[in-house]
Image (cartoon, rainbow, N blue to C red):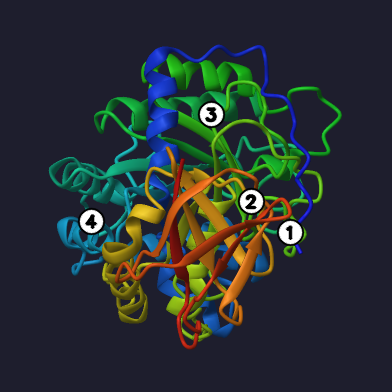
Amino acid sequence: MPCAAPVRAETPASYTPVAANLAAREWFQDAKFGIFLHWGLYSELGGSGSPGLAEWIMQENKIPAAKYERLARFFNPTKFDADAWVRSFKDAGARYIVITSKHHDGFAMFDSKVSPYNVVKATPFARDPIAELAAACRRQGVKLFFYYSQLDWHHPDYFPRGRTGHTTGRPEAGDWDRYLDYQDAQLRELLTQYGPIGGIWFDGWWDQEETPLRDRWRIERTYRLIHALQPAALIVNNHHHAPFPGEDYQTFERDLPGQNTMGYSGTATIGRLPLEMSETMNGSWGFNLVDDKFKSPETLIRTLAGAAGRNANLLLNTGPMPNGEIQPENLATLHTIGAWLKTNGQSIYGTRGGPVPPGDWGVTTQRGKTVYVHLMREHGGRIALPMTAKVASARLLDGGAPVTVAARRGAVELSGLPPLGDGWDQIVELRMR
């Protein structure tokens, strides 16, 4: 049965994007597949024996900020090779990368002039991996986005506390506006030190969600700063609500748009902006030694197609190891995804959600007058699609074998299909009249 149409919220009216921003949104919708990277001091602890802990280990293990700082002394990822990272992700078919420039632990993975608590000044590595990654992305034609945590468990002026960060040993005092000035100063660095970027991926807004102040985060001012410095840069905020004014696309954490299996999207109506879902390759965002529950390539490819059929991108996460290498299990899966996209990418890239709502059988995607039917469940050789448009021809995308097509009672019936068998996504290409 087709799923119910999701509720759609109106696009915020108080922000008017410029032409360069609109073009970037169009590019983003065409890109369809990105790689998420959670990498920082927390990577050294490898989850400390707990699946799913990873980048939240400072909070969950109640590590005081003064002790957590010691991790910087040991961070020396000598195997880090930005070009190798980008090459692997590009070969996997990804068109953009989002990397954690600062996570909730407050440590900057870039050369920040406004804080010595950063990878260049506080670690023996003494290099700026963000600069190296930005250069590699430019060389290889991949767009780079920066994740930035608004929440900060380290900065003394992050006060009053929100929902988290109560066990870090900081004085119960601080200047909230001074913290926001610090945040904006770091964002200015990210937008001026590394050339044109794809955008800023915000997280942590939810930590202060219940504050009685109307605009605790001063986001209008922050968003205006970003768009002034780089008008084409896209802003997204993982706040689990419909988009706020100034945001350029909407992301969903570990759920396809319209679903809420993780419990994050209960209040998130779907707006009219471009869409994205983020997902992990196991159960952790950051590197975790014991979390070996890796999702299969079949699951992730079906998720990619499912996102495209809902007019969304897939942002697939991997947590690099503390030595600077990508986990070999993740590289193997990415290689398989890349091989699949080389054969089937035309049904994903540059498409929009198709004319038939997603169902338990699969999804449709569309580019111009071509509709791609992604069949992901056994169908007995026949399937009826609730659509009235006239089909000129139908064929299997892989191999080109013709498929019988007929119009019956307000539906298009495809028949003579081979069994799905062990296939992950059987794609039928429909040429419309």
Q: Quadrant of the N terminus?
A: bottom right
Q: Which residue lies furthest to the left in this view?
A: 139
Residue at 70 percent across and 45 percent down: it is: 240
Q: How many neighbours does mark 2 have within 10 angstroms: few (below 14), some (14-19), or many (20 or more)?
A: some
Q: Is residue 145 above or below residue 11?
A: below
Name the mark nearer the viewer: 3 or 1: 1
Q: How many neighbours does mark 3 have within 10 angstroms: few (below 14), some (14-19), or many (20 or more)?
A: many
Which element type, helix, strand or loop, lies under badge 4? helix
Residue at 51 percent across and 78 percent down: it is: 295
What is the three-letter code of the residue carrying label 2? Val
What residue sits right under mark 4 in the picture? 86
Residue 238, image x and y in percent?
62, 44
Separation (CA) of disc 4 from disc 2: 35 Å
Separation (CA) of disc 1 from disc 4: 38 Å
**Marker disc for residue 39:** none
Separation (CA) of disc 1 from disc 2: 8 Å
Q: Depth check: 123 or 382 in front?
A: 382
Q: Depth check: 46 or 387 in front?
A: 387
Residue at 40 percent across and 55 percent down: it is: 347
